[in-house]
Amino acid sequence: MLRGKKIVLGVTGGIAAYKTAFLVRLLIKAEAEVKVIFTPSAFDFVSPLTFSTLSKNPVVSEFTQNAKTGEWTNHVAYGAWADLLIIAPLTANTLAKMANGICDNFLLATYLSAKCETIVAPAMDLDMFAHATTKANLEKLKSFGVKILPSPKGELASGLEGEGRMAEPYYIFEKIENYFNSHKTLINKRIVITAGPTHEPIDPVRFIGNRSSGKMGYALAAEALERGALVSLVSGPTTQKLTHKNLKLISVNTAQEMFDATTQHFKDADMGIFAAAVGDYKVKNPSDKKIKKQTEQTLVLTKNPDILAECGSSKKESQLVVGFALETNDGEKYAKDKLIAKNADFIVLNSTQDKGAAFGHDTNKVTLVSRGNNPLSFELMTKQNLAKQLFDIWEKHL
Ligand code: CTP
């Protein structure tokens, strides 16, 4: 299943383009989202109507949609949207341009700006395929990290027999599936994640809370699921949403509820990530009736249980524990202290000094503190990207 996978499919001007229509159908059947880009010469071989109907998206080819009004199609947005860029068929011409950074059409601009992996299926006549320039260009693309599918032997459009046919749609489809599955590095790993704030009741209508949005914890949960993990997300009140067949979402309000659910799920987990902003205190005797206003009001607070410290102290050798820390000053020192005090393996340190970081933002800037290693500082980036980079490190320890 490729459900929700975003695929940009480039079609260049080769006779094999008619087969690519079938690839679109396979991708759509597997629930991928597909956006098709034609090079100008692709129109000579296939109709955009076939591809827009199959992909359920308009086929794009030009930078400008309406030259008079100056409306344009954003190739950077296409590149950023894609989880994977496929070019099938890849002609010798487009190959040569890709190998040399030429950018004279929308597909090439998208290729140059895409952050995702690119897979190409070359297709050309046997002599063109065998030419030293083509071989050198393919080697060059390979060195840029582009995945090149084989062009098997067989009958070619020229009537000749030899290497240069486009890989069959089923084969390309299988490679796409394999690509996404190879990222499933956490299959069957059980991960418990706490996220969001906690609400400690004062009376039936009031509570003590904090400004945590839950975005970081949810981004981590989404990334773990993406990698194939089984995630128990113990979430305080938040507007964040996440659904997935491998997700168990446990919604809680108070720190005590979060403690009970998390410690329960942590017992059989491979990893615990404690991203919630847990209230340190709760009201000692919350009122069961709404408290009427008075000139003065005193609330007596008592300490909440520390979920991270409890899981850290009970953790088995094989379990990985990650805590978070938000500090105003001397962050690395305090984070190291927390690492030891709570028996964690990693502490993700946020500083209130960093713009665009921590509570409420879509971006974050953190330093990862661990035992025996120098602290590792990350640039400011989206919480989704940060989740990816953090899991690239953590998964090596699982
Ligand atoms: N944490 C927790 N349970 C609590 C309190 C905190 O699981 N009752 C976790 C948080 O999810 C986070 C880390 O502990 O991973 C934060 O540590 P904490 O000691 O709460 O930070 P501060 O409140 O900033 O502590 P201090 O005032 O000691 O710096």
Image (cartoon, helix red, strand yellow):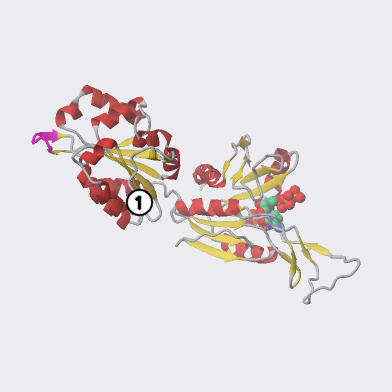
Relative depth, front residue between 156 and 250:
156
Q: Residue furthest top?
A: 132
Q: For the residue marked with disc 1, what is the amino acid?
A: Asn
Q: Is residue 370 visible?
A: no
Please name the residue that numbered disc 1 is placed on.
57
Relative depth, front residue between 116 and 113:
113
* Residue drawn at 42 percent across, 50 percent down: 184
Relative depth, front residue between 52 and 66:
66
* Residue drawn at 10 percent across, 35 percent down: 158
Q: Is residue 109 visible?
A: yes
- What residue span does the magenta drawing correspond to? 155-162
Residue 136 is a magenta residue: no
Where 88 falls versus 237 (above or below)?
A: above
Q: Residue furthest right?
A: 295
Q: Residue furthest left?
A: 159
Relative depth, front residue between 150 and 372:
150
* Residue drawn at 51 percent across, 53 percent down: 222
